[in-house]
Amino acid sequence: MMMGLVVTIVLLPLAAAVLTGLAGRAIGRRLTQALTIGAVGLSWVLSLLLLEQVIGGARLDRILYTWMVSGGVRFPIGFLIDPLSALMISVVTFVSFAVHVYSIGYMRDDPGEIRFFSYISLFTFAMLLLVTANNFLQLFIGWEGVGLVSYLLIGFWFEKPSASAAALKAFLVNRVGDCGFVLGIALLLHETGSLNYSALFAQAPTLVGQTLRLGFGLHLPVLDLIGILLFVGAMAKSAQIPLHVWLPDSMEGPTPISALIHAATMVTAGIFMVARLSPFYVEAPGALSVILVIGSLSALFMGLLGIVATDIKRVIAYSTLSQLGYMTAALGASAFAAGIFHLVTHAFFKALLFLAAGSVILGMHHEQDMRKMGGLRRYMPITYATFLIGSLALVAFPGFSGYFSKDALIEAVGHSRIPGAGTAYLLLVLSVFVTALYTFRMFFMVFHGEERMDAKTREHLHESPWVVTLPLVLLAIPSLGVGWILFHPLLGGGYWGGGLANVAGNPALAPFRKESAWQFFLGAFTSPTFYLMLAGIGVAAYGYLLRPRWPAAVADRLASVYRILLAGYGFDRLYLWFGTRVSPGMGRFLWRHGDEQAIDGLAVNGTAHGVGRIGSWVRRMQTGLLYQYAFTLVAALVVLVFWALVRSPGGILG
Amino acid sequence: MMHGLWLSFLIWIPVLGGMLLLLPGWKTPILRRSFALAISLVTFALSLWVWFHFEDRTAAMQFVERVPWIPLLNANYHLGIDGISLPFLVLTTFSTVLVVLAGWRIVDYRQAGYFAAFLIMEGFMNGVFSALDGLLFYFFWEAMLIPMFLIIGIWGGPRRIYASFKFFLYTFLGSVLMLVALIYLGQRVGSYDLLAFQRAPLGLGVQIWIFIAFLVAFAVKVPMWPVHTWLPDAHVEAPTGGSVILAAIMLKMGAYGFLRLSLPIAPDASRYFAGLMVALSLVAILYIGFVALVQTDMKKLIAYSSIVHMGFVTLGFFALYFMMGALTTEAARMGVEGGIFQMISHGLVSAALFLSVGVLYDRLHSREIGTYGGVAKVMPAFGALFVFFAMANVGLPGTSGFVGEFQVILSTWQANPWWSLGAALNLVIGAGFTLWLMKRVVFGPVQNEAVSGLPGLDWRERLVLFSLAVPVLVLGLWPAPVIDVMRSSVAHLVRQALATKIG
């Protein structure tokens, strides 16, 4: 019964994707939209049913079919349904549904519309496959599946060279992560003999203290190494330093994609994966420390980049990087519940922000530069209101969903005893100010102040159609309310029922066990993060409402810092240099000097010339002189006798 | 267990069919083409029949035929297959059907000869995969070179003469040494029965010489670095059909030789040389990956990509001597199974990629990447298929290209994590050269007028590419049937390879 439900939820979007992908042109755009939206909508409704069953205590851990058996290892396709995956399924299908509806309006008149709907349904399928897996094979299939669709969608407008370049970059950077991920799977298979999560969980305690000899004097703890290798994959998917570079460029894709894939769902795959494996990660404190440090560094330093970006989508992209850093830091502090809580609230308010930004972009006739916006609140009231809700949730304003998850997360890191937690806490607190600054800088630049667009654009400015604004409203509701509802069950531990490790006994989560959402809300006003946040909004207001010349003056004064931020700390330049100079240079060297000169030049053609030389030498031997022939015969005989000696029993070869 | 003349049919029906095609008196070209297609379809159907009547719970040879051939030498016409050879028979017959279809309209110069060459070659290749007699094996091994030599030399590109001679000399020189080794073994064992060779005890010194003789023959065919340089030239000059068979089947002969001859006949020498083989495999994966990156000719790029993928195959085979820990033989089996699966998958994917390049070449007569750009805009269906096959080449899960690489990476870790890392780096490098190709050819703005005028796929091209897309997808979603067929035989082979024969 439950198995059937899960299979239906997962396969509905696939069926829609395949049907519209193969026959889309025959069935037309209307039917394509109806099919894909219907399928994803139905999946969402069914996911609520599933969630209800799971809250009632139902669980599922079953294999659907055996992909293959090789070397005695079973490679299964199967599902694990528990509170974590049920929650993820509902979030994914809901956001996907909202994005599907929104795309009717956003992608209207695009010649690739049908292809677009087919892709996003395929994406939904791959993401569902990923979150429902009960084993590493399926996890990896979904993992790469979302990567594929992300590649296709970033490069959706493939005629734009920048889009196809961004798609290639995203795929390659993710592949770097996958490299680590696959090796992590190889190591855990080596240690446990199975690809099932349950085998890893069961055997992790027995592997504590074991080390792996890697040669060169390297002896690494097995569990930490598994944890770090798998996390390398998560670093790419969830865009953590130094594998974050693909995410800002992914904004080349259509905006609904940025909302669905590059904010709400796919980029959270890494976060989900670590939480999914939490029973194992608690046994790998070394890996957790690495995760904690990477996460908190990403939170602050990616946020700083948001302050100087001028493309509205890029600002939101940097905020996504920073928020993912927050989630990662929570995982590192082994406060998995807090990380997932922020994942959920972030999915709603970040999808909302992106879609609202898309609405702005539609209104501005595909202009994304905030320097050419301003004063839009008068023209787009619904977009304005929903964008404000999203922004307040993002900066963690008390009462908005982001507040509950983010402040709880920061507090949990503060209480954590994982090495590195002190520094991480400091970085996270600092970036509260940064988050507020870049968010409201964007908000003021877009909706307030002077109207900087040209007259023609201004004439055509108007609110977007209902298919665009309805999803905004749909997403604004959870951005406001979901924090209140989920705070206690998710952090107090009532919801998880043992599905997530380290909820009950975790000192980092201890403060929330007794608190209600209301008490936590009231606590906001005595917490320093609240005032840091206000300060951030205040600075933004000063610079972008009151003294519009001030930011430029500051940038001038801090020119070197400004340049470093604009260049994104130089990661892109380094990787670009490696990708377009070093690698092809190596390739050309190996090709020209290795293949062509050394192998072909010396060995092959050299042999051919050698044969020619022997030929002419042999020709000279055909002299017609009998004695020479006789001599050759004798010599040949000697060789033959020698050969017989050699290969006789007891000879050299015998 | 099945008996009968099924294997002989698989060999001689296409050979005879090909010879009939060469006879004068065919009224119209269409009749000739249809006959060639019919022969290839019948052979394919026969191979499927064999597949479904194959007993996969045993490692013993099946469909065995044995009659005296050269009594003086005690050589027999001895055929038989196990779970390792069976998938290659089906792959051969399947590829031949596609090649006949793909050459339908394109080849108009000496068409009868073209189809005849492919049919005759098909028969001989089936012979290699089913021969159980050393001399018979050698006969088919050399015989299949001749049609390929002619295909490149007659229907090839401008530098076809250089390429065909390079191909022939390279592969012929290699196989001469193999003949010496086979004759030595025949003298020593008293017959040319390959299974007897496998059972015969041999000292390490002898094994080493035999292994080297085989290695030269097989390494050239695989091809392994550094004897790989004939491949890009051969591919570039070969007509599309020739490239397909070369990549899909002929490259598999070397790796098949390792499985059928080197590992079971000279297991101790294989262990002795395993480190070298692993090193050469890793060089193929990494070095050639970078070389592939800078190619400007699409066919050369895919040729180099083939060498990379075959590196995974030989890595999977020879890492088996280094497996450590509790699951030694299990890991060894996974590596060998992964290598074989990679061969099958590469047969499908590289065939598809060469056919895709052929589709473009037939239209603009250029293999240069720079000629193209924005093809997806003009030929959307083709663009989708080309990208799909590229993704299979990259080893994306859900395609057949993933399975073997995954098995090899997983199992190699148990031998040495660093080798596993080296292989895993292909996740990045392979994606780099393949998808960069896609970016330049399929995506981007429409490059020029020639591209904007490209006609879409016709029904025949669609049929051919879809026939390859289906197995690539199905085997990616469910590789079990192919793995199941080979499991017993691989287990037997691994036992042989890990045993010692030093008397």
Image (cartoon, coloured by chain):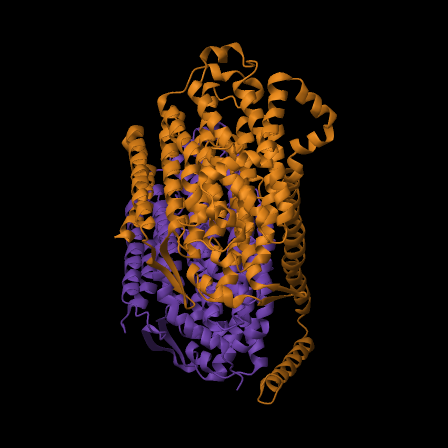
Chain colours: A orange, B purple
Task: Locate residue A526, reporting x and y percent.
Answer: 57, 35
Hey, which quadrant is residue A566 in on the image?
A: top right
Relative placement, left or right, of A470 versus B142 is left
Residue B441 appears anywhere in the view: no
Q: Residue furthest bottom?
A: A650
Picture residue at 36% right of the left edge, 27% below the top: A104
Hey, which quadrant is residue A370 in on the image?
A: top right
Picture residue at 50% right of the left edge, 64% below the top: A204
Task: Locate residue A278, reporting x and y percent.
Answer: 48, 55
Residue A344 appears anywhere in the view: yes
Looking at this view, is B404 or B385 the one in front?
B404
Looking at this view, is B188 or A384 the one in front?
A384
Task: Locate residue B411, reporting x and y percent.
Answer: 50, 64
Q: Residue furthest left?
A: A1
In this rendering, is residue A606 above or below B391?
below
In this rendering, is residue A385 above or below B86?
above
Looking at this view, is A167 or A278 the one in front?
A278
Looking at this view, is B66 or A28 the one in front?
A28
Hey, which quadrant is residue A33 in on the image?
A: top left
Task: Locate residue A332, reporting x and y percent.
Answer: 56, 50
In this rendering, is residue B332 above or below B395?
below
Picture residue at 59% right of the left edge, 36% below the top: A529
Q: Quarter of the image containing the N terminus of chain B?
A: bottom left
Tell how many labels: 0
